[in-house]
Structure formats: C-alpha cells, structure tokens
Image (cartoon, rainbow, N blue to C red):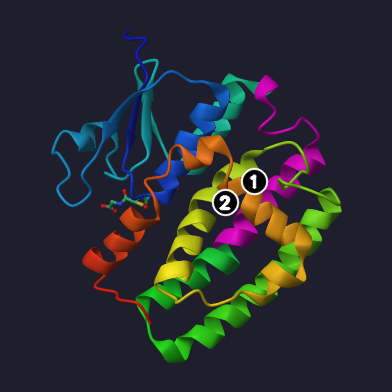
Amino acid sequence: MSDKIVFYTAKICPFAHRADIAFREIGLDVEKVEIDLSNKPSWYKDVNPETKVPALTIQGKSIAESLVLIELANDLKPEAGLLPSDPVTRAQIRFVIEYFSSKVTSAWYSFLRDFKKENLKNYLDALDAAYTRINDLLLEQASTGPYFLGSQFSLADVAIAPFLIRQEASRKELFKDAQIEAFTKYPRVKEWVEGITSRPSVKDSYPGDDYINDSFKNKWGLSSL
Ligand SMILES: N[C@@H](CCC(=O)N[C@@H](CS)C(=O)NCC(=O)O)C(=O)O
C-alpha cells in the first residue's frame, strides 16, 4: 500500500481551501493534484464518485467532504489543538460553522445568484443580523481574538475563513465596497475577520482576490454592481 497522501483540490473552491488550511496547520505532507472543475478528468470518479473536490487519498483509501477532512486533520494531529478536547467547546465550534454556512454563506450565494443593486440592502441586512449573533458567539468564547476561541486557531476558523475571504473579495470589488455595519459596530467581529483572513495557512493557500473576482465575472457572468 502506498504511503503517499494525495490531496485533490481546486484553487477556486472554498471547500477544498478548508482542507488545505487544516493540512498546513498540522504539517501534513501531501501531493497536491489540481482538478479542473470545468473539465474534470474521467479517472477522478474512481477517487470520488461524486467528482467533487476536496478529496484525499490516504492509506490507500479515498476520503471526501471538507468537514470530514478537517476533522481527519485534527485526528491525525490532535496536539495541534484544532479541536479542543472539551465536549461543549467542540459543539460550539461545530455550531458556529453551521451557523455561518446557513446564515452568512447562503445569503452570499443567494445574492450572487440574483445579482442586482436592489438586492444589496437585503443582503447587508441579513449579514448584519447574522454577525450580531456571531459577535455574541465570539464574546462567549473570549473577550478578544483574533480567533473564534481567542488566541487558539481552531476548526471554526479553518472552516469559515475560505468563505469569509472570498466574501470580502467580492464585497470590496463586485459589491463596490458596500459596508457591513456589524464590522464597525463590533470590534470582536472585526478583529476575527482580520485575524482569520490574515492567518498564514489561510493566505498562503488562497489564490488571491483577483483570481476569485475574475472567476465570478467570467464563469458567473457578473460585473460590479
Ligand atoms: N459538501 C462538499 C462540497 C464540495 C463542492 O461542492 N465542491 C465543488 C467545488 S467548490 C465541486 O467540486 N464541484 C464540482 C461539481 O459539482 O461537479 C464539501 O464540503 O466538500
């Protein structure tokens, strides 16, 4: 059995970015294979029958799904502290990941799908409400950041950062720098946004704002509001 670990990824994909960050955080030595999502190789279905990225081949087995892979990273090296041992803290980490996906990321995707100036206010209102709750969740963990738990970077940050960094890229360019009130109202939220998006494992595995915005423009046919 090969002991090589192969990571199937795509620069554009926030889900794959999650896995990339977690692997960097634990220092996992992976061979990276970039999958062209617009022209997926036929052999890829043997790695992941759903033909989505991310996927990992490890110990001769293929594993998919970003949240599964970041938990695997934690299990491979628990001493990195990505998922602390306290059961309640673990549940709170899983909760904020779910909350961010269902409130912030889903609002972002809805806005991108129906991208019109008149929908901007609704989008910003939805974000303001969601970040008000996130502010409470952050303060429940620690009064200062820069991360969800405070000074310890965790799976909450790993799972959210790829979406937040892309949302910030699109907000600044495509949404004409529209302001999210909660970022100025809540210093803990602002510190967290800055903290997780500037973490080296996040930044170094991110293809850059231009790459992301160009892909929205080219593939989704979007232009600035
Ligand atoms: N639930 C999956 C979602 C992964 C996903 O949707 N990946 C997209 C790219 S961002 C993909 O591979 N799409 C290709 C396709 O659907 O054919 C996860 O968390 O890993």
Quadrant in the picture for the N terminus: top left
What residue do we see at 58% from left, 79% from top? 124
Residues at marks 2 and 1, CA–CA distance in whole angstroms: 6 Å
| Of residues 120 and 48, the one drawn nearer to the viewer in this rendering | 120
How crowded is the residue under tag 1: few (<14 C-alpha within 10 Å), some, or many (20+)? Answer: many
How crowded is the residue under tag 2: few (<14 C-alpha within 10 Å), some, or many (20+)? Answer: many
Query: Toward which corner of the image does residue 200 lie, by quadrant?
Result: top right
Query: Toward which corner of the image does residue 133 lie, by quadrant?
Result: bottom right
Q: Tell me whether the residue at label 2 lies in contact with that at label 1, contact meaning CB atoms closer than 8 angstroms.
A: yes
What residue do we see at 40% from left, 56% from top? 209
The relative height of residue 166 versus residue 146 in the rendered view (above or below) is below
Question: Element type at marker 1?
Answer: helix
Please name the predominant secondary structure of the magenta segment in the image: helix
Which region shows up in magenta?
79-101
Q: Position of residue 51 (x, y in %)?
A: 26, 44
Q: Which residue position holds label 2? A: 160
Query: Toward which corner of the image does residue 131 lie, by quadrant?
Result: bottom right
82 displayed left or right of 137 = left
> Is the shortest distance between ligand 1 and the CB of mark 1 under 8 Å?
no
Q: Which residue position holds label 1? A: 156
Extreme bottom residue here?
118
Q: Position of residue 4 (x, y in %)?
A: 34, 13
